[in-house]
Image (spheres, rainbow, N blue to C red):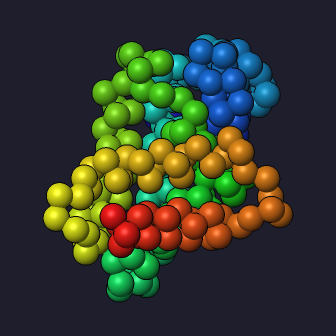
Amino acid sequence: MRADSRLPRVLDCAARLFRQKGYQGASIREIVGTVGMLPGSLYCHFASKEDLLVEVYAEGVRRLRTGVESATARARDPWKRLEAACVAHLETLLDGSDYAQVMVRVQPQEVSEAAPRLIALRDGYERLFGQLVEALPLPAGTGRAQMRLMLLGALNWVPNWYRPGRQSPRGIARGFVSILRSGLDHG
């Protein structure tokens, strides 16, 4: 990739449009037009629109991972670590940045050319939650993989209904973990 002072603005614009319109709805012309770049100039940085998406997606994953790793480093109790991860995940998704939202909005199967790379990025991030769930003191026979998927699905759906001021990301995350924990304690 060549150095270009407009590249960070292109990535920001791509993240915003992928979040708002999805991969198919966002055009290269629209993405580069906001920074005064010709569509062909983008190909000096990225071989394809799919490569641009992968770069945006990777940045979203990086932001989520950084938040979760930082939050869980301070907690020792397995349930508190899971709660801290959920809080960090939601805070990152709801912080107004578009990058992490792209990971939730754009599904790998929508972009077959980039699907393997997007899935690898997503799976790498989800392994963090897998490790947290593995560390929980759960009853024998608890479906840990299903628990992880259910929790991530619930967390990733929050941006669809969240309204600032009604409940904080911390409150939502605590509620989700509390429901999981109490369901297991009474199951």
Q: Is residue 19 left or right of residue 147?
A: right
Using the rendered view, name the quadrant where residue 90 is placed: bottom right
Q: Residue drawn at (70%, 36%), measured in percent from left and top?
A: 16
**From this viewpoint, is residue 74 visible?**
yes
Q: How many marks?
A: 0
Horizontal arrangement in the rendering, residue 37 relative to residue 92 (left or right): right
Whether 33 is drawn above or below 122: the answer is above
Instruction: Name which residue lies at 79% across and 53% down.
Output: 163
Residue 26 at x, y percent in the picture: 66, 19
Residue at 62% from the left image edge and 63% from the top image edge: 172
Quadrant the C terminus occupies: bottom left
Residue at far left of view: 140
Find the residue positioned furthest to the right: 165
The residue sitting at the front extreme is 186
Query: Which residue is at a point 59% across and 15% down the rendered structure image?
Result: 24
Where does the image place residue 152, in percent across and percent down from the top left? 45, 50
Left or right: residue 122 compared with residue 173:
left
Name the foreground residue: 136 vs 41: 136
Whether residue 51 is visible:
no
Question: In front: 167, or 5?
Answer: 167
Measured as percent of width and height from the top left, residue 184 is found at 35, 66
- Residue 120 position, x and y percent, is 31, 38
The vertical placement of 160 against 84, above or below, is above
| Residue 185 found in image quarter | bottom left
